[in-house]
Amino acid sequence: MGLNMFTTLFAGLALFLYGMHIMSDALQKSAGDRLKRLLEILTTNKLLGVLVGTAITGIIQSSSATTVMVVGLVNAGIMNLSQAVGVIMGANIGTTMTAQIIAFKFNDIVPYAIIIGTLLVLFPKKKSYRHLGELIIGFGILFMGMNMMSDAMKPLKDIPEFTQFMIGLEGNPFLGVITGLLLTAVIQSSSATIGILQVLAMQGLVPIEAALPILFGDNIGTCVTALIASIGTNLTARRAAVLHVTIKIIGTIIFMFILHPVTALVAMTASEPARQIANAHTFFNITNTIVILPFSAMLISFVTKVIPGEDVYDKFALKYLDKRILETPSIAVGQIVKEIIRMGEIAKCNVEKGMQAIINSDERVIDEILNNEKVINELEKRIGEFLQEVMHTAIGEEQQKKVGMLFNTVHDVERIGDHAENLAEIAQYKISNKVSFSSYAIEELKEIYEGVNMAMENAFLALGTEEASYVEAVDTYERKVDEMRDTFRASHISRINTSECNINAGVLFLEILTNLERVSDHCVNVADVVRVVDKSKFKLDRVSQIPPEKC
């Protein structure tokens, strides 16, 4: 009897979590672009951060996933602690939606939901209908799991030890907090543990007086996921995770002091225990946000003192990508673009340094170019690995197409870096062999480089903004570079024939033209991501401005 009860309980819990997972994936596929736009509007305005956190968690149905994503974004340097505190508080509010949904009695429509959802997944060709079908199926499976847990827990009322334990919790609120904390820390989902609490309440197994401390403990326990995710991150990301715990602990302490008035207030909001718990969950997190948000600067100061020190910048590390962002893959795609642009800025900088070394015979920058080339090669490897992981997550078909193209984009950027390295080698040869160019040659090199530089600048602007005007500009500059290459090659050969330039200088000059022209070719390939992806099916969004790399 006991074994069968626990088997049914855990099977129901498994279905509940799986249903949430399906719903989350379906919502991300259909609302992924909105997630990106929500992050793009994020500013230092903490109230706006709360709204963004609430909206994102409402979409992905998991405060843990949102908080882990925040840790990843902070670790990637995209979000600071001031922004993170608002998003985390918003996530705490957004996650209460699950408990509110559970409080509705949808048991009778579960079979119909699964049937309708399956039909929508199997037959319509339109992706939006399939995503809706997946969402409905996830909804049905979630409530199926709830029903199984409810059936499994019915025999608990006949077990004296369990009823005595619940009576003990009613008289010892602190023990209730510890119980909720440990249960959520093990299951790694506050929505699941609060769902279990609602089932117990519906069966009359836990009074509201005992349920609330457990609920507060659940809220603290959900922070464990973020704490685990912060292991191995930078200093600021670890502070974000500790910030999350601090917010929950402060809220729990406040509510434990006013437990009896809160219990009476919650009892007045609804007659059904499950709805009372859902309302308490919402009330706790909204009140917590209202009380604590004005003191967020003090909170940030506190966690900075708890975790002191300064981060050490590693130029070889990914700046805008973190594996924790894979919790929300639609956002990860936008972050990949940012990382590629950063890589492109380093390559662009190297081309500039290569031309500086050639024109000014400046040997000092050659080592900088070679060191930057190592960074470019490492970034190509790491971005490629991240792209592979994103391909296996819940992204739509058009996003998968774009991710597939970004593999080629990374390679094109790396090839720009290779051509910059070639320019450095040409400069080294020119300096070592004391080769000099005529004033005509120098002016022509400056002119063609200016065209190539504009092609690079517009290519990365196109990649970041998805604006067709930048793509057209790349094409224009590439054509000009091709024309200049042919014209300058002919004029340089003419100078060699009239002995204005020697053969060694002529060979180097032509190699420089070839490398610069190929850089512009790769710029066209970079802009092709914008040109090829079908915007009628997949709305591409602007990537927020990223600071340029120091050149």
Image (cartoon, rainbow, N blue to C red):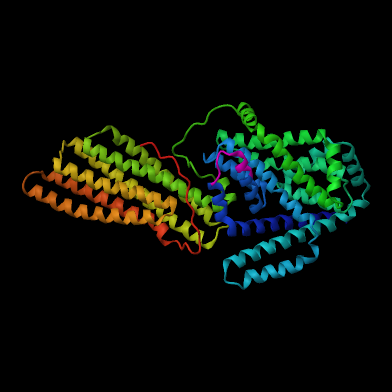
Q: Position of residue 131 (x, y in %)?
A: 61, 63
Q: Position of residue 405 (x, y in %)?
A: 43, 58
Q: Give the residue drawn at x 83%, y 37%.
A: 259
- Whether residue 177 is visible here, answered yes or no, is yes
Q: Give the residue drawn at x 55%, y 57%.
A: 392
User: Which residue appears farthest toward the left when viewing the image?
Assistant: 498
- Report if residue 42 lies within the magenta region: yes
- The image quarter in which residue 503 lies: top left
- The image quarter in which residue 19 lies: bottom right
Question: Is 104 located above or below residue 383 in the figure?
Answer: below
User: Which residue appears farthest toward the bottom when viewing the image?
Assistant: 123
Q: Give the residue drawn at x 64%, y 56%.
A: 24
Question: Which of the two residues, 455 or 11, is positioned nearer the viewer here?
Answer: 455
- Report if residue 280 lies within the magenta region: no
Question: Which of the two residues, 545 or 227, is positioned nearer the viewer here?
Answer: 545
Question: Which of the two residues, 187 or 270, is positioned nearer the viewer here?
Answer: 270
Q: Position of residue 95 (x, y in %)?
A: 70, 48
Q: How many marks?
A: 0
506 with respect to 421 (left or right): left
- Whether residue 424 is visible here, answered yes or no, is no
- Image: magenta residue range: 41-50
Question: Is 19 located above or below residue 287 in the figure?
Answer: below
In the picture, the quarter occupied by the C terminus is top left
Question: Which of the two residues, 433 or 31, is positioned nearer the viewer here?
Answer: 31
In the picture, the quarter occupied by the N terminus is bottom right
- The image quarter in which residue 79 lies: top right
Q: Position of residue 429 (x, y in %)?
A: 21, 39
